[in-house]
Image (spheres, helix red, strand yellow):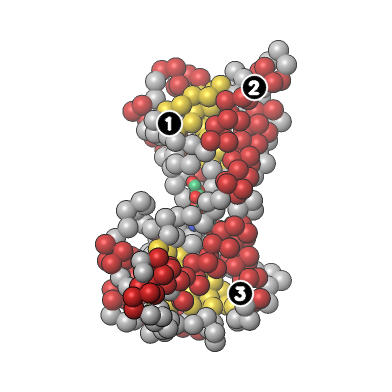
Amino acid sequence: MTKAEQLQTVAILVPGDFNDHAVDRINHTFRPVPIERADPSLVTEEMRSKVRGIASFAGINAAMMDALPNLELIASFGVGYDSVDVGHAAAKNIMVTNTPDVLTEEVADTAIGLLINTIRDLPRAETWLRDGSWVRKGNYPLSRLTLRGRKVGIFGMGRIGQAVARRLEAFGLPVAYHNRRRVEGLSYQYHPTLKGLAEAVDTLISVAPGGASTEKAVNAEILSALGASGVFVNIGRGSTVDEAALAAALANGTIAAAGLDVFADEPNVPKALLDAPNTSLLPHVGSASDHTRRAMADLCVDNLVSWFTERRPLTPVPETAHVKAKAIPGKV
Ligand code: NAP
Ligand code: 8YV
């Protein structure tokens, strides 16, 4: 058998409604195994004995990994992988890959769009034009807020955070940041605590990953430190925010406005945030262009191809970078 013929025998589980381009490539390269969702109760005996890889948007928990004893690789679609139990994967010698870099500039563009929508009220101004208010009532009211004179803090100065910061430099705005560690070679002001950052700026952009270490990190104390002219933008993960505290801060004037692309329980958005006049909301579209989703799909599938031909991943997550592929005699 040629390598390509051998690859067509490798069973890859594809939960739910996956990216079309990724599905196309998996169908042509591997033996695709669709499943309604990543739920161990839906795993058949056939899947249990055959599946060696998963390509997934969705979270993969420990029970799902345990239901697939021959699982070698989880190729996660997206850079954030908080919904995959990577600790369990590492303990079971299962490799996890993600799709960094190829989406960085797109997500940074979206963050800037959301920031401007939030501050200058552009979505509501467009509605004013479209619903005839411009003709009936006259000019749209002046925006209460402006980007001019703002100081911006970035929570999560990684790949995307730095791409956002580069854009803000071009806007003439000073940038500071908080990470657990200072980033070598960056001249932006570093704050060792999120509270210190929030006190020093009036505009906080979160690009931090989800997970235990950031759970509800943006809470009432941080919002109060941001202050009454404060604007909060979240393009990272919804779990990093205490949404009840955010809704209260928006309602009582603790901060001025918020722009959110991500939510704690997607696609459900708390009514208080939907109803607030000072929010700008997007349905998790940070990377959602054909161009960028295709690049993510290619990297997701290239990880599968590399693992099952070269026996190494292209973009492993740090927690499983040490995992080595087992040699399977006579097989890819
Ligand atoms: P990255 O390069 O790994 O950057 C993450 C940054 O967050 C790092 O600088 C890291 O620095 C910091 N960080 C991590 N845990 C922290 C903690 N507990 N406290 C403070 N800082 C912490 O990742 P990226 O490629 O920029 O992506 C960032 C996140 O954006 C993803 O994980 C994902 O959740 C989100 N995202 C959203 C969309 C969207 O559509 N809205 C699209 C893509 C990505 P330290 O390790 O030094 O703390
Ligand atoms: C995707 C994202 O929408 O990469 C991420 O972490 O949040 C987005 O790019 C998501 O991963 C699709 O599943």
Give the number of the mark in front: 1 or 3.
3
Name the disc covering residue 168, or none.
3
Q: Is residue 174 above or below residue 180?
A: below
How many marks can you see?
Answer: 3
Q: Residue at x 44, y 36 (%)?
A: 17
Determine which residue is flagged by label 2: 7
Determine which residue is flagged by label 1: 66
**Is 204 on the left or on the right of 159, as rendered?**
left
Q: Residue at x 41, y 70 (%)?
A: 129
Q: Is residue 62 above or below residue 210?
A: above
Q: Residues within 10 Å of mark 3 (few under 14, many from 20)?
A: some
Q: Amino acid at mark 3?
A: Leu
Q: Residues within 10 Å of mark 1 (few under 14, many from 20)?
A: some
Q: Is residue 97 above or below residue 207?
A: above
Hey, which residue is sitting farthest top in the picture?
1
Q: Amino acid at mark 1?
A: Asp
Q: Is residue 95 above or below residue 83?
A: above
